[in-house]
Structure formats: C-alpha cells, structure tokens
Image (spheres, rainbow, N blue to C red):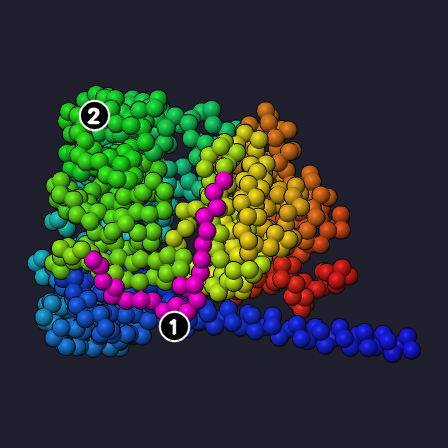
Amino acid sequence: MKILNRLIELLIIIVMALLQKLPAQSNIEKLEKIVQQSEEIRLLQVSRDGRWMMWQGVYETKPSEMNVIDTKHPEKMMKFDAKNILFIHDHNLLIQKGSAVEFKDPVKGTTKEFQNVKAFGSIESNDLFWIHYDAKKANAVEVYSKDLKVIYKMSEVDRVKPLDQNLAFYTSTDELKEISIFSSVQKKSEKIYSGKSEVYSLAESKMASGGWLMTVMEKQGLKAIYVDHNHQSKELVVNGQKYFDVISNKPSANEDGLFLILGNYEKMNNDGLDIWYGNEVNLTGHFRKVYEPNRVVWFPEENKIQQIDSRFIDGIAAGKSGMYLSIEKNLDQVDYRDTEISPVPEKTFLYDAKTGSDIYVDEILKYTMVDPLGKILLYKEEGQWISYEIATGKKTALSIGIDASPYFAGETVLWTLNNELWSQDMKSSKMHKLKTFEGKLEVLNARKDPVFNDSNISGFVVDLHQELLLKVIAEDDVKHSVISWKNGVVKTVINQTNDKISSLSGNNTSKSHYWIAENYNKNPVIMKKGFAKKTAEQLYDSKHPDTTLKIGMKRLQYKGPNNEDLTALLYLPPNIKKNEKLPVVVYIYEVQRKYHNDYLQPTFRNQDGFSIRLLLEAGFMVMLPDITKESEGPGISALYCVNQAMDQLSKIEQADMTKVGLMGRSFGGYETNFIATQSNRFAAYISGTGFSDPMHSAFAFNYGSYSPDYARLEHGQYSFGDFSENKEKYIKNSPLFYMEQVTAPMLLWSGLKDTNVSPEGNKSTFSALRKYRKPVIALFYTDENHGIIDSKLQKDLTTRIIEWWQYFLKGKRNVPWILKQTKDAV
C-alpha cells in the first residue's frame, strides 16, 4: 500500500510539472513573437534637397532593410534588401546589393547597375561618385559626374582611400608600390609616390602649403615621408633615427608644421622572471608592448624638428596659434590612473614649437576649453570661469556663472547658463545677455572640434550663420521643447513634449525640420515640420507590438540621503487590472530618471540580461529608483535610497510587496550584493559582475587598465575615501562581511574574461552563500567580458533572468536549471 501511495504521489508530481511546463514555455514563446514584431530605426538621413529620407529598419530575428520615402508623399515607400545606401548629389541613391551597386534617381526614375563592385563612395562637395570594381573587371576605378558620365578611369587599383575632396589610388606591381591622387576639382590624377616600400598610411598634411604625409613600412620599421605639392619628398629623421614602431599624426597648431607622436616598443621580459618596482607609475609594460612617446613638430619645408620637452605628458594643438597645451608630469603620482579617476589641478603650459620655449598658464583642473582659432583658453578656477588670451597671456575672470557652458563661434563665445543665453566678445571678454528662456538650455547642434576628439580637452563649436537648435527643459525635467535661434529671431521647432527627440536636423532647401520621437509607451516615429508650419506631421511609424500604447508609468517621489529630491520610475505592464496584485522587479544603479522617455525596445539582446519591456510583457511591474551617495558609503546610501523608494512602492495598490525582486549589474551588482545582506524586503536577487569585498578590491589588480583599483574605490563611482582613513567605512559597506544575513535566493552572473570587475568577486559571493547554505546559482560565461556580447548568450541570460523572476515571484516551478538548486526546498 505504501508503495502504491508513493507511486500515486510521484504521478501527481509529474502531471503537475507537465501542466506547469506549458504556460512557462508559451510565455517565452509569446515574448519571442513580441520581439519579432519590433523594428528599430537607425541611420536616419535626409537628402541634400530635403525631399527624400532614408533609414535602416533593424529587426532581431530577420535581416534589416533600407527604407526610402518621398517626404512629400510618405505613403510611397521604397524598400531595399541592401547592405548600404548612400545619398549622392541632391537626392540620388547608390544602393549596395552584394557585389552589385545600383544608381537610382527616384525623381526621374533613372537607374544604372554596376556589377562586380568591391567598394564605392561619393565626393559630396563636387557632386561626384566613384565605383571600384573587383578583379573580374581589372580592379578598375571609375569616377562619375552627377549625370552619370565617366570623368576619370584607372585600372589595376588595389584600394581607394577617400580624402577630403580627393581620392588616393593605391596600385602595385611585383616591383613597385605607387599612389596617385585624383583631384575632384581638376578631374585628373597625379602620381605622388613610387617605391618598393608598402605604404602604411596616407593623409593630407593640412598645412597651408598642402602636400601629404605618408608612413611606409620597411623591414626596420615605419618611416614618415612628406610629399609636397611639387611631388618632392622628404624623410623624417629625429636624432639620427628614421625608423619607428609607432608614427601617429595629430592635429597641428602650426600651419607650416606636422605634429607627430613617435615611439619604439620597449622589449618585454620573457626570461621567466618579471620584476615589478614600487616607483613604476605605469605597470602596463608588464602585460603588453608599450613605448615612451616622443612628441615632435616637423617643419618639412625648413627641414626643422622641434621636440616637445619630455617633462610634459601631453600636447594638444591650441587652435592654429602655434602653441601646444601641455601638462607637466606629476611626480607625486603613484599610478597613472590616480589623476584620471580623481582629477587634481595640474600645472599647465603652452609650448611654442617654433622657439622650443614654454609659457606657464596656471594650475588647471581637467576639461579646459580651447578655442579652435587659437585665441583663448577657458578654464575654471576657484569657482569662476577664467579667459586666458593665448597671444598675450592676459587672464580675465568672467562674470558668467560657474555652471555655464561655452561654445566657440568665430570671434565670439556663446554661453548657456540655466535658462539664459549669453555672448562673450573674445577681444574684450565683455559678456552680453542675449535672451532668457522658460527652461534650462541645452545646445543640440554643437559639434566637438576634431582636434580634441582623443583628449579630455574640449572645443565645442557652433555656427552663428546657421540656426542654433536649443532644447528648453522645463522645471520638472520631464517636459521640453526645441526652439531655433538665429540672429535674435526665435522660432518653435518642437512644441513642449515629454517625448525623447533624436536625429534632429534642419534643411534649408526644403525649409523643414526632421526628427525621431519616442517614449516609453510610444514606438519611434519619424516627424517633419516646415519652418513656417505650426504643427508637425508624421512621416513613418515604426513597427511595434500592439501592447506598446497600453504601458503605464508612475513617478514615485522621495528624499535621498542628503535630503535631495529623487524619483523612482515605476512601469506598469499593459492590460493591468485595477485590483490586480503584481510582482515587481527593481533594477538599481545610480540616478535613472533620465531614462523616463526611452522607448522600451522588446529585445533579448541585452548585455546585462535586463529588458524592461520583456518583463512588462511577462506580467511584472518594473521600478528604476534613483540612488545617490552620502558620507556613510555607497552600500549604505543605496540601501537608504532603495528603502525610501520601497516605501513609496508600498502605496501602489497593484504592487505585491511580498513578491519584489532586486537586481543590478556592475556598480548596481555591488549595491545588490550589499542590500541583500541588510534587507528582508525582497523575495529574490540577481547580481551581475559586482564587487563583493571593496576592502580586497581596492588593492586588487585591474587587468583592463593594468593598475590597482584603489583610485576607483577611493574616488570615482564608489567614493569611499582614502583607505587608510576610512577602513571602518569599507567594512560597514562590504557585502562579504555579512553574507550569513542573506534571507532570499541569489542568482549571480559574470563573464570569466571580465577585466573590469574580476569574476573572482562573484565567486567569493557564491562561496560565502554556499558555505552558509543559502540558495544560490552562479552563471559564468566563459568567453564574455564585463557585459555579454554574443547574441545567443545575451538571449540565454535574458531568458534565465525572466525565468528566475517567474520562479520566485510568480510561483512557476517548472524551470529545471533552478529546480536543480531548490528541489530539496520545494
């Protein structure tokens, strides 16, 4: 009888498991269908005449497609299964389909197909395009005018490199390597190089006299060659040396000079012993090849070379002033990352490449603003903005507020300060208020001068001859409008909205603005508004699930640890019923209210496995609380903020406070680890790539930066303060010290090749929880880093996270990989 009863019990368990299995499977299948229905809009472009618009529609489970519409008749859409499309001339198209490229004029209906193409492009400034054929057509290059006439042709071209208004053609035989430059103005080519050496790189010199800078590869290394407009060449020789492992061409402050960074790799020790010395500022050389950079300014016409003094660690062209902004080495620095993470005022100089002399400017904190014209520097000192005149060394304390942001505009500096727009005359430094707006200002169409692209120095530029697009943010930080400002004339481009606006551009030919609008319950749409129109029209509505419009959101308000106003975004799933109780997933990091108007893309491709949309579609509420820091430490601060947000969540009728889960990744993973040891308000946890013991991590070695992590822990995101002075704070905020207090199951995940946050942290967390017999599962992705990159593994992690929450917050027990851990407890 006992055996029969046992068999009956076993049969009931099997049947119940099978019954439960179907809903769980169908739930994931339902999410997969929702993902399939969703389209992302990428690479939005408007033709030069403003008549035609193009974008890439990207899908998760099928190939992307290129779409083209007539903005006057948006219902007429052309779809192309194409790798790439270029607008050329006003509105013509070059459409790449495998090895074929089609030219199409959508107005005239003209088409021309090019077969056996390996590369193509355009020279927009002169209305030309080029086609580079493969070996079946003798590797020929053809350059076409806008009326499809061949204006130049060359055969046996290995590769084509586009330059500003020219094309470089690389050709070779068994004996010679040659480069010819095609001029889009003269419509002809000229040979500038012929030799046995392989050309490694080529760039226009940007000098007033023109010419080109080439680096060629020879057995001894790289060699720099300048070729002038008469095709005469000169080789760079520095202290008798002309071969280098590294030759890097940087923007020059001299119109008759080239600014180069040269170097030769130091030999790595491979004799079985690696010695580290305490006075080494940079330990990178113990792991990969490094070189000591030699910064030189080469004046090829004079055959003169000026080396920037080795006591400086930097050299950034200060416009075309002939001066280079240089920072003196900090001899008190222990590790090279110390001042990267915790900036300190640095002794800053202007180096004159003509004379080899330098001028002391000031002790400046990072993020100096440099005028691209080379006339002034702007920097902050003791709570005020300072204007430094490069030519004279004159310093002027500006009357503008310290929170203002500058934008260079020729001889003028434009400033935004909260809701005010100001101008500053460079010569006199006098400030003049231009206008006051009804909200905080943000410039949308400023560009960063390319001179500063690889530095912490900035030089943001606006063109006051064109319209200035300004985002005007309301006091609630939710609503905003976009206005156009030109010569004092203000026009509304986008009326006040809480939509997220992106890809905004204006077209003077069509006299219209174009943009993408989206929100948490509004899929991305493409909009158009004429300059003289009061209302905008919708040109395209991206594909999306029917549930998008039914998603809800509440903003929960609470006070932070410093009595600051914080917000938690609470997303409500579609079709929620008034009296329905639902589980809640809380995702933590830092301040997150800035994401309030992001479209919630349904996707399995998430680096951290977290998809708000898929969780909503699976029947969860999702909350994103703001977290700020105060003096007691990051863990305690996070606990305080999350508790405050949870108190507000408890006031929401539909929130089931017995079924709330907490999750985070990286810094959020650390916060989750700590809160799990201090709280009993959560039914389960998920922690990804987070620190478990800041005491150990402070001095652990970071294999991403090849430096210890104390700078990041003492300052930066964690802000514990100096370790020797705050040991108690490290202990009080260390999750590993309190793992025996965890009261709910934890899921941990890491990439085993994570060089930013060592997976050993999660292994320690796992070991501690395992020791104290806490329910824990750890996922280790063997070939992944700090985030999951492989799309199949992204789906795996996202799916497992959904299943984890279904198991512990919705009671769906038929998840085999979780049951393997919890079977004895169920």
Q: Compute the Cα span from label 2 to label 1.
A: 55 Å
Residue at (50%, 62%) from the top-left corner? 576
Q: Which residue sits furthest front?
A: 579
Q: Secondary structure at mark 1?
A: loop
Within the magenta stretch, is there residue 536? yes
The answer to whether residue 46 is left or right of residue 37 is: left
Q: Which mark is residue 168?
A: none
Within the magenta stretch, is there residue 60? no
Q: Is residue 731 above or below residue 478?
A: above
Q: Is residue 472 above or below residue 79?
A: above
Residue at (14%, 50%) from the top-left corner? 231
Dot in front, 2 or 1 = 1
Residue at (11%, 58%) from the top-left corner? 509
| Residue 709 in view in this figure | no
Q: Secondary structure at mark 2?
A: strand
Amino acid at dot 1:
Pro
Extent of the magenta region: 535-558
Residue at (18%, 55%) from the top-left corner? 534
Amino acid at dot 2:
Glu
- Residue at the disc numbered 1: 63
* Residue nearer the viewer, 707 or 654: 654
- Residue at the disc numbered 2: 389
Quadrant occupied by the C terminus: bottom right
Q: Is residue 804 above or below residue 114?
A: above
| Residue 480 in view in this figure | yes
Give the x, y percent position of residue 542.
Answer: 34, 67
Give the x, y percent position of residue 455.
Answer: 34, 39
- Answer few, some or many: residues within 10 Å of disc 2's Cα (few below 14, many 20 plus, some between 14 and 19): some
**Dividing the picture into quarters, in which one does residue 277 lie?**
top right
* Residue nearer the viewer, 485 or 800: 485
Give the x, y percent position of residue 671.
Answer: 57, 43
